[in-house]
Image (cartoon, rainbow, N blue to C red):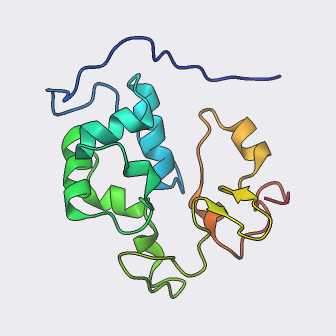
Amino acid sequence: MSRQLSFDFSEEVTFPITTPLLPIRPKPLEDEILSSWLTRVAFHNGLTPSQLSYHLIGNHYLLSIEVDRIPSQHLLKSITIHTGISENEILKMAFSKYEDNIHLRFEKHGNIPHVVSPGYKNTKTGAIRGFAFCPDCLREDREPYFRKQWRYTFAVSCNKHARLL
């Protein structure tokens, strides 16, 4: 059984949105990564991720940066104001939560050790790579989302389905 999500972006959205709380605020799912949750928040509110970015931080670049690392105080505060999600819940979706558990030590900018970048281009082959994922998990999800465990360089297969990512 094939299932497709569809979102209507035909209505014009006026910025800035004047109400502090977004009308629809889905809860983060287990092991969900921040960029995945922000994308779901956007779609639930009839926005593109770019439009949500403009609403949260005043520009369209939020998801083109590595938002899954330690979010800035400005971003944390903005997400909290507009979604009602606590800063602690937001940080649980970022890699900063795991810093001590797997010895991640990273700077504010640059690559995070043991974590695959959200997208990169192989300079030798020209191939573009994005997030690894388990298609079975996404198919079974009531609402598909990306998990943090899939971003680790040492995660080569799905824990649930034993399928290569």
Asked if 77 appears above or below 48 in the picture, the reply is below
Instruction: Classify residue 131 as left or right of residue 25.
Output: right
Q: How many marks?
A: 0
Q: Which quadrant is the C terminus positioned in?
A: bottom right
Looking at the picture, tell me which residue is in the foreground, 6 or 90. 6
Asked if residue 63 lies left or right of residue 24, the reply is right
Q: Residue at x 47, y 36 (%)?
A: 40
The answer to whether 79 is drawn above or below residue 10 in the figure is: below
Residue 96 lies left or right of residue 54; in this view the side is: right
For this orientation, the residue located farthest to the top is: 11
Image point (21%, 63%), residue name: 73
The quadrant the N terminus occupies is top right
Q: Nearer the viewer, residue 16 or 146?
A: 16
Image point (84%, 60%), residue name: 164
Residue 64 at x, y percent in the picture? 45, 52
Residue beneath the point at 62% across and 69% down: 116
**Residue 22 pos. (x, y %):** 27, 30
Quarter of the rendering containing residue 47: top left
Q: Can residue 84 be spotted in the picture? A: no
Q: Give the x, y percent position of residue 17.
A: 20, 27
Closer to the camera in the image, 123 or 111: 123
